[in-house]
Image (cartoon, rainbow, N blue to C red):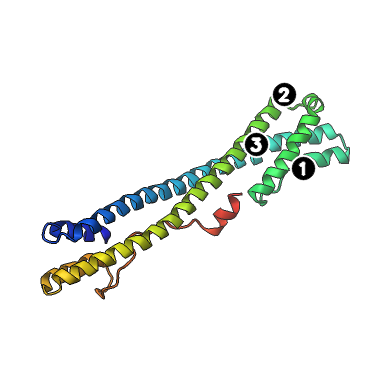
Amino acid sequence: MVQRVRGFVIARKDIEPAYGPALARLEELLKRAEAILTRQHDGQAGARRARNHRDELRRKLQLELTRYLAAAGSVAANGQTEVADLFRLPSANVTNAGFLVAVKSLLIAGELQHDMLVQSGMSPTLIDDLRKAVADFEAASQTARDARRDHMEARLELDSITAVLTQQVNLLDGITRYHFGFDSDVMDEWRMARVLKGQRHNGDVLPPVTPQPTPPAGEVENAA
């Protein structure tokens, strides 16, 4: 809608000098809005990529690394319940935060019992691989949180600049009505420029930009 308003004003700015300052301000706001929209999109896309990477790491940790460590721990325990309890697998249904806590506990147990576990058949490099996967998992979680924060901050900025853009379009509406109110053809074109597709031409100034959708609540919870 704002781009149509801009086109309408540009076509008549030489006829009506009062459009000049208002148009300059409108174009400045449009550039800012486009930059914010880009940030919002990048934040959402970055969060999605980080979550996907974290999901891949969780599957690797759940199905490969911790399973191997737990099996080695079970053999090394040799019937000792207190040792076997140190190598229990984390629940598949726990949140990402809970999963990370459980895997870190396994990692600590593996580090403390490293020699015994190797003697029981564990690869000497498993603990190093597990430590790296845990660090990567934490990094992916932090990246997802940072990207989502950028997305939400951009959304708030977009709401703010939308209100300012609406005020600027209202100013242009006042200029147009004052100088072209007698010309029904011009006013019809102006009303068409000011509404969004599918909306009635009732003279209301509609929001010029639409923020990106917010991810589902489940994604927010698992981002921790």
Viewer-side residue, 168 vs 124: 168
Dot 2 amino acid type: Pro
Q: In which quadrant is the N terminus drawn?
A: bottom left
> Which mark is nearer the camera, 1 or 3?
3
Neighbour class for label 2 at 10 Å: few (<14), some, many (≥20)?
few
Residue at 12% x, 74% y: name it.
Answer: 184
Left or right for 79, reference 212: right
Dot 3 amino acid type: Val
What is the x, y in percent for residue 217?
55, 59
Dot 1 amino acid type: Arg
Viewer-side residue, 94 vs 5: 5
Left or right for 152, reference 95: left
Mark 2 or mark 3: whose residue is earlier in sequence:
2
Mark 1 or mark 3: whose residue is earlier in sequence:
1
Q: Which residue is mark 1?
A: 88
Residue at 38% x, 47% y: name it.
Answer: 38
What is the x, y in percent for residue 65?
67, 35
What is the x, y in percent for residue 2?
27, 60
Disc ID at residue 134? 3
